[in-house]
Image: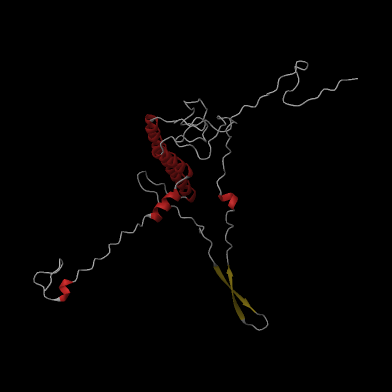
Amino acid sequence: MQRTAWSKAAGSVPSDRLRPAQRPQHAPQKQNKGKDKTQESSKSKAIRKLESLAEGVRKSSGREKDPKGGCFCQAREHDLSPYTAICRGCGLILCAINLPYYACPHCSAVLLSDIARSLLSVRFDEEISKQVAKEEEERSRVVQQARDAEGAFPVLPGFATPPVLSSTPSHPTVQTHKILSLNSKTKKYIVSSYTNTPVSSRPASRAESEVEEVHRVAAPPPEINFVKRTPDRNHPWSNMRMELFYVPVK
């Protein structure tokens, strides 16, 4: 009998020569996608902005230019940038629209050194922690005010504050009413049912849902506008930008 690499030495049954089938291994499914989206949507706008800045500082090299072109208002229309106020290469004043992890919009110089980048990353982490603590304190203050308005007993420090249940439902519900009416002639009663179907609120329009775009001042033209023709000696005070024709007075 011919032997193969997978046949047993003492096996005489034909089934012993069959190679065992390999079961496919299924990769574990990720079940945290929904939780991550919920946690991301529950964050405030200020925290999301700080996290976006911190992530950009950590991942970018600093040589990328702003795809939107930056802003050249020189802090005249917007506030001065709290992170990179001036470009050390060309001296351009940078407003808050120019993000710190992009290059200078004028000379393309790197705005942050390696040390400044690491310090700014630590600063963003501290600002995120302070913002989270501030929002948590504000949330606790609102809950305490609601409890005081309802006349509840104050909560001792160190104990978790139970959530305040709202008396109004978050979603409109369908309500059914029954009316009993009596006919004076036939002396019979009639039971009628009425259902109140709540009207859902109007969804936000497209203009309301879109984020308002910030006005950016464009870069100045590369060419300087100047008068190229020779001034007239007979009319030294004439406007050289306009073609004027002097008519002699008779």
Residue most extreme to the left = 10
Q: Can residue 17 be seen in the rendering of this structure?
A: yes
Residue most extreme to the top = 233
Quarter of image, res 3: bottom left
Coordinates of residue 95 in the picture (x, y in percent): 52, 32
Nearer to the camera, 23 or 198:
23
Nearer to the camera, 204 or 129:
204
Coordinates of residue 237 in the picture (x, y in percent): 75, 18
Residue 229 is left or right of residue 220, and the answer is right
Quarter of image, res 230: top right
Which residue does the image show at 63% across and 78% down from the upper left? 182
Which residue does the image show at 61% across and 79% down from the upper left? 190
Residue 182 is left or right of residue 124, and the answer is right
Color style of the picture = secondary structure
Coordinates of residue 6 in the picture (x, y in percent): 15, 67
Residue most extreme to the bottom = 186
Q: How many marks?
A: 0
User: Can you say whether 177 is above or below 217 in the image?
Assistant: below
Residue 205 is left or right of residue 232, and the answer is left
User: Can you say whether 150 is above or below 236 in the image?
Assistant: below
Which quadrant is the N terminus positioned in?
A: bottom left
Quarter of image, res 158: top left
Nearer to the camera, 53 or 243:
243
Which quadrant is the C terminus positioned in?
A: top right
Residue most extreme to the front = 2
Q: Can residue 152 be seen in the rendering of this structure?
A: no
Coordinates of residue 126 in the picture (x, y in percent): 39, 36
User: Can you say whether 195 is above or below 94 in the image?
Assistant: below
